[in-house]
Image (cartoon, helix red, strand yellow):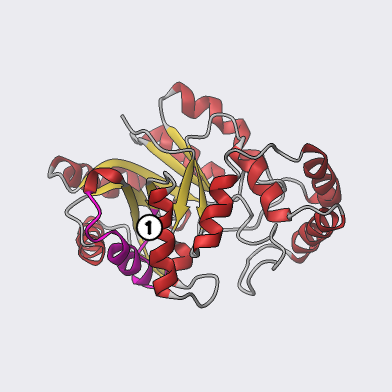
């Protein structure tokens, strides 16, 4: 059975997705995470076009394999490069294993399924991954995407061990909650990623490429300002809120420094700041639950 820690290490920053990173510090961050009990690391070939996987592989070299779980992805290979065909998926899986220096993945994720044909993913991509599982290359199979409807539809027509949803259980958007009972009834585990809304709820604000509409960016900026005025760290408040999500197996947080790892692990024990949570949500106002378009068929 798939058992995940409450807090997982999101490795997109290791690929430079949110800005330049120091690889040596990233490796130290992975080692510190292991020391503090973080055992789940999520990466993808899309993150830095292989750089994230390579850095993670360097960090895990020499670490006993039973000490960690690694998840990577198939299907998304570049900014606008999607290919869910079985041969490409198998080749991509093998390339990921080589970059990571591993002989198997624990979790494999069909990446951003809203950019593919769900029927084809169910008929071709997932069976190819099932064969890879039978060959010992992967252990558990799941899917990721932004639109919750895409994950629901795929889960209705294909066997999944887990789904990876992002930016839908945050202080600004809790729409994932409505789907949790259905997944629980089918023993499909739910991983919540981007609990800070891909930077929306951080003091630094989102990166320039962030796809959120301007109104949502501004509303989250107001929420961040409210937290600061109250003497609170908005990112800590937002993470504390997300870590309390009911029915979520693990919350993935992007990290690349030792300080980030230590702060995020500390949040597992720190009481939530309920008053600041409420004030931030009030500041977001009518933008609560709003998202942005993603995919080619929705």
Taking the spot 82% from the left edge, 54% from the top edge, the residue there is 231
Residue 53, position as x, y percentages in the image: 33, 65
* Of residues 77 and 139, the one drawn nearer to the viewer in this rendering: 139
Front residue of this view, candidates 86 and 252:
252
Residue 147 in sight here: no
Q: Is residue 226 left or right of residue 163?
A: right
Q: Where, by quadrant of the figure, is residue 26 drawn?
A: bottom left
Q: What is the x, y in percent for residue 15?
A: 43, 70
In the rendered view of the protein, which quadrant contains the N terminus?
Answer: top left
User: Could you say which is closer to the camera, residue 116 or residue 193?
Assistant: 193
Image location of residue 29, percent across then percent down = 44, 61
Q: Quadrant of residue 46?
A: bottom left
Please tell me whether residue 53 belongs to the stretch shown in magenta: yes
Q: What residue is shown at x 62% (from left), y 35% (from top)?
A: 244
Q: Is residue 135 left or right of residue 296?
A: left
Which residue appears at 37% of the width and 43% of the height?
A: 142
Q: Position of residue 202 (x, y in %)?
A: 69, 60
Asked whether residue 287 appears in the rendered view, the answer is: yes
The magenta segment: 42-64
List the residue tagged with mark 1.
Answer: 31
Element assignment for label 1: helix
229 vs 175: above or below: below
Residue that appears at 34% across and 68% down? 55
Q: Residues within 10 Å of mark 1 (few under 14, many from 20)?
A: some
Q: Would you place residue 86 above or below residue 54 in this image? A: above
252 vs 110, left or right, is right
Q: Is residue 138 magenta?
A: no
């Amino acid at each position: 059975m798939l058992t995940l820690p409450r807090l997982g290490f999101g490795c997109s920053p290791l690929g430079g997705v949110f800005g330049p990173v120091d690889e040596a510090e990233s490796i130290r961050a992975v080692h510190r995470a292991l020391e503090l009990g973080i055992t789940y690391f999520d990466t993808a070939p899309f993150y830095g076009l292989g750089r994230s996987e390579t850095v993670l592989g360097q960090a895990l070299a020499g670490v006993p394999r039973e000490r960690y779980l690694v998840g990577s992805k198939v299907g998304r290979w570049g900014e606008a490069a999607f290919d869910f065909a079985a041969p490409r998926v198998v080749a991509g899986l093998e390339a990921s294993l080589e970059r990571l220096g591993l002989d198997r993945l624990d979790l494999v994720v069909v990446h951003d399924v809203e950019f593919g044909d769900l029927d084809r993913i169910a008929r071709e991509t997932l069976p190819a991954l099932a064969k890879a599982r039978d060959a010992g290359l992967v252990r558990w199979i799941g899917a990721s995407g932004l639109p919750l409807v895409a994950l629901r539809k795929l889960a209705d027509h294909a066997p999944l061990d887990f789904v990876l949803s992002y930016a839908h259980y945050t202080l600004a958007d809790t729409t994932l909650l409505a789907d949790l009972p259905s997944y629980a009834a089918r023993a499909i585990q739910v991983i919540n990623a981007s609990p800070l809304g891909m930077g929306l709820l951080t003091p630094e604000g989102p990166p320039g490429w962030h796809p959120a509409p301007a109104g949502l960016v501004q509303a989250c900026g107001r929420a961040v300002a409210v937290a600061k005025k109250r003497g609170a760290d908005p990112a800590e408040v937002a993470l504390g809120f997300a870590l309390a999500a009911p029915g979520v197996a693990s919350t993935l947080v992007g990290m690349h420094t030792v300080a980030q790892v230590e702060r995020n692990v500390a949040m597992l024990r720190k009481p939530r700041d309920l008053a600041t949570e409420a004030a931030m949500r009030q500041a977001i106002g009518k933008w609560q639950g709003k998202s942005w378009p993603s995919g080619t068929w929705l």
